[in-house]
Amino acid sequence: MRMNKLAFATIIGVASLSFPLSALALDARDFADKLSIALSAGAGMNIEFKNASVDGNTITLSDWSSPDTAYSKGVAMANTPIVFFDVKETNNGGYSAKRAEFKDIDFTDDDLNFKVNDITVHNILVPVDAEKDLLSYMTLYDEISTGKISVSYEGEEVFKIASTRATNDSNDDRSIFSSIFEINDIFGDLSKIEDEEVRAGLTAFDMTAIEGNMFGDATWTLADGRMKVDELYIDFKNIGRLNMTMDFSGYTLEVLESMMEINKQLAGIDPASPEYEAKNMEMMMYLAAQLSFNEFAISFDDYGVTNKTLDFVAAQQGTTRDKMVPGLAMMAPMFLTQFEVPELQKQVSTAISTYLNDPKNIEIKASPQNPTPIMAFVALVNNPPALLALLNVSVLANQ
């Protein structure tokens, strides 16, 4: 009799342990719905996953759809299954996943084929209700990366990228966000271009392909809405490196919420329609009314393309680079004469002459003495001297 009681007690104990385990099984549909809400709230993209299945702690989402006109093409291209690994329900009802992997994209439209391999997202955190916590979209993932991206035309590869990567990060109280992106080993085959004039120009530049990289690094501080791009460059072999830095303030959480709302409206409008253009202009004007300008700079480091360009233009005009450069150096300052800014005119003259005679680098920077509302610049658009003075523009070469 004692053995029967012991066996019964054991069965009851096992059952009591098994019940909560089954109750805690992942809900794939709930996961899909909350992810859709996060994408809609953060990126303004209405994405629905028709199929959601679970196998242990792995969730697979597939068969995407979107009613949004603006994103319909992109959704069709990216419509491959996504597998989320090591999925867990968080204490507040959201979800976390160690990583997600997309099935490789292979999309063909007429003679054009687009492929993306090895799409992976790391450290995903799906909020319980992104509409009530817009910042959760900023921490939706830590990193997204791809392997090779290629574009083929009529069966021949004309463009490829070796890999891409983008990261998101924030401090503990989510008051400062940072992000970087990188696009590695860009290659564009120019030998397939059939236009004779273009081919002649490429031959003069000894250019059969473009090869390079892109990189960007930015931070966003919530307290003052400061958006600072420390580096945003495109670096192409045998051409040069174009780099931009930007510093704005006023991009607060409230502004972000308004922008997201306008983005949602834009998503349902045909991009080719006048309504879309009007709504897009409305968004730009709203943003201009909220932001203040701190600094902007654009610079170019020459890898040899400037002298090749000068030689090409000079040959077309029946002269030489050395004879043509002095005249070019005078043209830009003469153009500025009408704006009545003699100090800037002198700077531009010196910088262009210095650069054209020995191309190394040139930079144009606008740095007002104090943060200035963008609308203040708009108000001075018909007063160039005052506008340029407020912008505090400088032009330097070979620094």
Image (tube, rainbow, N blue to C red):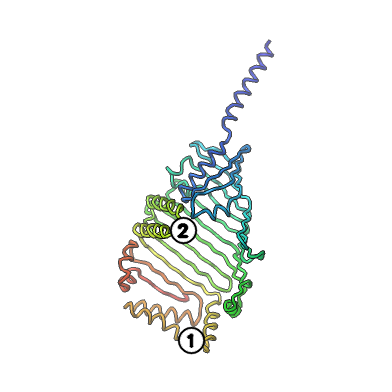
Against 69, residue 19 (above or below) is above
Q: Nearer the viewer, mark 2 or mark 1?
A: 2
- Crowding near pointer 2: few (<14 within 10 Å), some, many (20+)? some
Residue at 45% in and 69% down: 298
**Residue 339 in sight from this viewpoint:** yes
The label shown at residue 324 is 1
The three-letter code of the residue at mark 1 reads Met
Along the line of sight, the residue nearer the viewer: 366 or 59: 59
Task: Please state if 187 lies on the left or on the right of 361 as rendered.
Answer: right
Along the line of sight, the residue nearer the viewer: 341 or 60: 60
So how many labels did they put on this image? 2
Against 145, residue 111 (above or below) is below
- Crowding near pointer 1: few (<14 within 10 Å), some, many (20+)? some
Along the line of sight, the residue nearer the viewer: 101 or 295: 101
**Residue 162 in sight from this viewpoint:** no
The image quarter in which residue 337 lies: bottom left
Residue at 42% in and 72% down: 364
Task: Please state if 255 lies on the left or on the right of 94 as rendered.
Answer: left
Residue at 60% in and 26% down: 17
Q: What element carries label 1?
A: helix
Image x and y of residue 39, in percent: 49, 48
The three-letter code of the residue at mark 2 reads Pro
Image x and y of residue 77, in percent: 58, 54
Quadrant where the N terminus is found in the figure: top right
Return the residue at label 2.
271
Compare marks 2 and 1 and give the one earlier in the sequence.
2
The label shown at residue 376 is none
Image x and y of residue 304, in percent: 55, 77
Q: What element carries label 2?
A: loop
Task: Please state if 262 lies on the left or on the right of 140 as rendered.
Answer: left
Task: Please state if 378 lies on the left or on the right of 229 as rendered.
Answer: left
